[in-house]
Image (cartoon, rainbow, N blue to C red):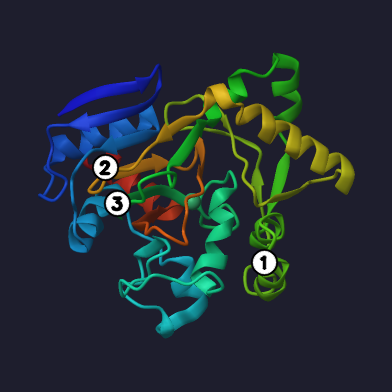
Amino acid sequence: MRIEPLRAGFGATIQGIDPAREADASLRAALQDAIDRHAVLVFPGQRLDTEGQLRFSRIFGELQPTLAARRDGAAAAGPREVGSIGNVDALGRTVGAGERQRILQLSNLLWHTDEAFSVDRGRYTFLSAHVVPPEGGATQFVDMRAAFSALPVREQNRLLLLRVRHSLAQSRRLAGTPALAALEEDRFPAVWHPLVHAAADGRLALYLASYACAIEGWNDDDARREIDRLMAAATRPELVLEHRWREGDLVMWDNFCTMHRGTPFDDQHHRRQLRRTTVSESGARARRTALTAAA
Ligand SMILES: [Fe+2]
């Protein structure tokens, strides 16, 4: 396995492995070390099928059912752990402008970390590209360890013990889809998470997302200003790592030390189809415990 860093300490391209094949213990350990260090891993041109993506994702822990599967139950198409990102649905049909899948995905254009609105958050996300548009439709990342360490020490100390409320409805409102917010508010109640936590490499990281809507003990205006200020500082253009998809690429990232967003594309004229799987926070923890016990 060859690791080629994309930026100093953030993002790497992995060559020389075949994610479609069973990984032995030493490859698993090397991959875990690579994601802990680099936070975003790009595996170019893998062309994984759904089974291959499920198997590779499970190296890092148990997967969580997609939001669509949890919301729609049996009505959701395809395996419960595989999400469709883009404007092609699970059956290969292009989704029209006013259709639900398109509207639901407007939130993906906002900086976020996956499933921050859940008690059991998304830990590792895997995206594979099946159809990519000629322009746009990239995925951008920022390093939330770097975002925290760039703050003055006095400010870091001030943030250490804060807790932030995350709600799916907040992201729906920011994306301009308040009707969805109203629908989902009761189904997915907001949750509290620490604003600062230790990332896998031991460094402290900010944990923020478009879902962030309140700070414990703060009034609404002050909290909104503080969240917006921290989000803006973390996502300054010079900090952004952009992955421009080519068909067959697989990218994975650690949601506990990054934020990401999709970039727009001409979805009236072009197709974009990515498949997503996500290892849950509890799944990743259980996996790590098992690895430590075996070592
Ligand atoms: Fe996402």
In the picture, measured across the screen, residue 118 lies left or right of residue 61, that is: right
Q: Quadrant of residue 155?
A: top right
What residue appears at the point 57 percent right and 58 percent down from the top-left corner? 106
Asked if residue 19 can be seen in this view, the reply is yes
- Residue 273's spot in the image, x, y percent? 35, 59
Residue 30 against residue 212 in the figure, above or below: above
Element type at mark 3: strand
Cα–Cα gap, marks 2 and 1: 33 Å
Q: Badge 3 local density, few (<14 within 10 Å), some, or many (20+)?
A: many
- Mark earlier in primary sequence (1, 3): 3
**Nearest the eye: 268 or 11:** 268
**Within 10 angstroms of label 2, few (less than 14), some, or many (20 or more) residues?**
few
Q: Is mark 2 within 8 Å of ligand 1?
A: no
- Secondary structure beneath dot 1 equals loop
Residue type, mark 1 in image:
Pro
Per the image, the residue denoted by label 2 is 291
Q: Which residue is mark 1?
A: 189
What separation in Å lies between label 1 and label 3 (alpha carbons)?
Answer: 30 Å
**Residue marked by disc 3:** 128
| Left or right of residue 197: residue 75 | left
Q: Residue at x 48, y 73 (%)?
A: 70
295 sits to left or right of 6: left
Discs 2/3, front? 3
Q: Position of residue 111 (x, y in %)?
A: 58, 43
* Whether residue 118 can be seen here: no
Q: Is residue 21 left or right of residue 33?
A: left
**Residue 201 at x, y percent in the picture:** 42, 27
